[in-house]
Image (cartoon, helix red, strand yellow):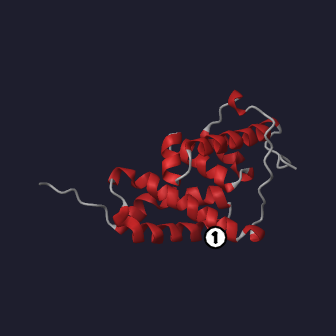
Amino acid sequence: MLEISRPNEKEIYEGYFEKVYKTTFYILKNEELAKDATHDTFIKAFKNFNKINQQSKINAWITTIATRTAIDIYNKNKKQLTYEFKEEIYASNSDEFNYTKDELENHLDNIPPDQKQVLILKYVEDLTEKEIAKRLSIKLGTVKSKIFRAKQKLYEQYQLGGENSVGE
């Protein structure tokens, strides 16, 4: 039987470094913290690499680790960050608009980390809501509500021209 070789640590690091860094930076908006989160992500990934069964899932798996690691760092360093996430407002119907990837990235600053995580997995990683729920070990309804709330917040920012006064 022909055995397909698994990628080694160097191949994984080189192949996913940029994606992991971008993911952590979207959440943290701080270069040094994003570097720390990227480093921690690869340590966690290498320690647990034997747990992944399907090589085709490495991309989503490592992105999930990166997102969770960045959220953990964000929560530990909340007061030191130069920006704060604003409270959520649920007034608008966000199904009336569609963002391009660049527009979405520009407005992610004011989205809470858990909502940002599902948006990144859905719109950057192109995972389905069901796949996101499975990856994050949360209910499908929770994924849908986080996406809905985040899209509402994005819509409010869009209406205000991206001002940071949303939610105040």
Residue 127 appears in the figure? no
Residue most extreme to the left: 1
Name the secondary structure under disc 1.
helix
Residue 149 screen position, x and y as percent: 71, 42
**Residue drawn at the location 49% of the way across and 52% of the way down:** 135
Q: Which residue is mark 1?
A: 32
Residue 119 appears left or right of 3: right
Q: Quadrant of residue 148?
A: top right
Q: Amino acid at mark 1?
A: Glu
Residue that sits furthest to the top in the current view: 96
133 horizontally vs 142: left or right: left
The one of 93 and 80 positioned closer to us in this rendering: 93
Quarter of the view holding residue 124: top right
What's the residue at 45%, 56% (across, down)?
Answer: 61
Residue 96 placed where, x, y %? 71, 27
Q: Nearer the viewer, residue 35 or 78?
A: 78
Identify whether 97 is placed above or below 58.
Answer: above
Residue drawn at x 56%, y 42% is: 140
Asked whether residue 153 appears in the rendered view, the answer is yes
Q: Position of residue 107 (x, y in %)?
A: 71, 46
Instruction: Give residue 154's quadrant in the image.
Output: top right
Q: Position of residue 129 (x, y in %)?
A: 53, 41
Q: Residues within 10 Å of mark 1 (few under 14, many from 20)?
A: few
* Residue at the image position 56 percent from the left and 51 percent from the top: 138
Quarter of the rendering occupied by the N terminus: bottom left
